Amino acid sequence: MFRGQLREGGFTVFADDLTGNYLASPDGTIIDCNATFLSIFGFRTRREARATNMATLWAEARAHTEFVAQIRAHRTLDPHECLRRRRDGLIIHLIESAVGDFEHGGELRRIHGRLFDKTTSQLAEHARREAEESYCQLLRSSPDAAVVSDAQDRIVFLNPAAARLLGAEPPDALLGHSLLQFYTPRDQPAEDAQPDAPLHHKLVRKDGAVVDVETMQTAIQFDGALCTLHISRDVGPRLRVEQALREKDREVAVHLTKIEKLNDALTTLMEHREQESQRLLAGVRTTIEQLVLAYLAQLKATPLGPDQRMLVEITEANLRDIASSFARDLESWEMKLTPTELQVADLLRQGKHTKEIARLLRVSHRAVTFHRNNLRAKLGLIRRPINLVSYLRTMAQPVRPGSSIGPRRAQRAAFG
C-alpha cells in the first residue's frame, strides 16, 4: 500500500503528496491514507489511523454527517476551509476537497479527500494581527503624528496626533484619502528617500494653514500589504526659536562691531592723551630746568638766612624730583597722608632732623615726633626693623619706564 501511488476505484492516493490524502467509506471508516495525513492528525501508523473513524476527527460530530450529505448531493466538493480535531484533541484549520466514488446504482461507495493544513499559517496570521494591533495601539498613543499609506499613497491609518496636525477630526475621516493632498507641490515625498534621513518639508492642513514638519519614512507590513509609515513632528516652534536666535546673534555681532570700533577710538584717544601728557610734562620739565631752577640758583647766590637757604634747597630738590614717584606713591598709599604728614615725610627724606623740621614748619618737637609715628603706622612699619628715612628715600628714587616703586619694594630696599 502507498508505494509510489495507490489506485482503487479510479482514485489515486499519492504516498509522497504534500497534502493529506485519504480513502474513507461513507460511515467514516478510513480505508487508507498517506504519511502527510498521519502527520496532520498525529497518528503514528496507518494501522492506528485505520482503526479511527473519520467522524471523530471533525471538530463537531454532526459536521461529518453534513459533509457526507454534500458529497451525495454534489458528488464532489471544491476546496473549502474546515475545522478538524487531532487525536490529541487540538483543533486545527484545514482546507479540504473531496470526490465521491459511486456505484452504478448511484449509491456512494467511498470518499477520496485531500487535506491541506493551514494551522501554522493561521497562527502566524493571528500573531501578525495581534502584533499589528499592538503596534497600532502604540502609534495611537504616540505624541508624534503617525500616518500609514499604501502603495497608491492612500491613508490606511493615522493616529490622533496626525489628525490634529492635518486639521481633521476624527482620524477616521481621512482614511482612504490621498496623503499627497497635504503636501505642497515641491515637497512631494521622493520614492528614493533615505529611510533613516529626516525630511524637512511643509504640510498643508485642511484649513489651508501651512505647517513646517520633520518626517521619518520607513517601509512596513500593514494589514498584509507593503505600506509606508510616516512619523512627523511639528518643528515650527523650534524653527521660530532658531530664527530668533539667529537674529539675536546678528544683533550681538553688530553690537560687538560697534564696541570694537569704540574700543579702537578709545585706544586712539588714550594714545593721543598720553602723547599730550608727555608733551606737557616735557614742557614743564623744560620750564623748571631752564627758568625756575635758574632763578633759584640766582636766589641761592644772594645773602640768605639759614632757614631761608634750607627752604630754597628743599624747593629746588622737590622741583628736581617732580617726575619721581615719591609724592605719587605716598598719595596712592591705602592709608592717606595728611598735608602735614606729607611735608614731614618730604623733609625726612631730604635728611632733615626733627629739630630742623620743627623750626621750618613752626611746630613743636613733639608734634614732629607725633607725625613721624603716624607715618610709620600708615606705611606699615610699626614693630618692623625698617628705617623710616631709608624707606622714604627708596620711594623717592626715579622710576624707570615699565617699573614701579611701591611700599613693598621700599620695605625690601630699606631692609637691604
Image (cartoon, rainbow, N blue to C red):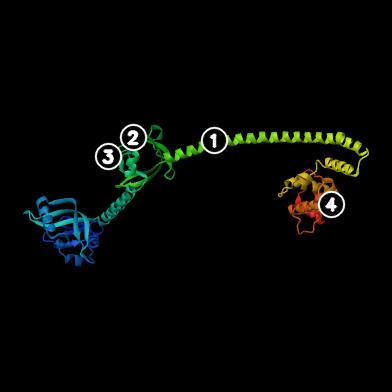
Mark 1 or 2, which is nearer the eye? 1
- Give the mark nearer the N terminus: 4 vs 2: 2
- Give the mark nearer the N terminus: 1 vs 4: 1
To which residue does mark 1 refer? 251
Based on the displayed image, in which of its 4 quarters is residue 207 positioned?
top left
Q: Is residue 124 above or below residue 166?
A: below
- Give the mark nearer the N terminus: 2 vs 3: 3
To which residue does mark 2 refer? 181
Say which quadrant the C terminus sits in: bottom right
Mark 4 or 2, which is nearer the eye? 4
* Residue neighbourhood size for the residue with mark 4, other residues' Cα within 10 Å, grouped as few (<14), some (14–19), many (≥20): some
The span from disc 1 to disc 2 (Cα, nearest Å) is: 40 Å
Q: Please report the residue visible at 78 percent of the width from the left and 34 percent of the height from the top.
A: 280
The span from disc 2 to disc 3 (Cα, nearest Å) is: 14 Å
Q: Is residue 396 visible?
A: no
Where disc 2 sits, the SS reads helix
Mark 3 or 4, which is nearer the eye? 4
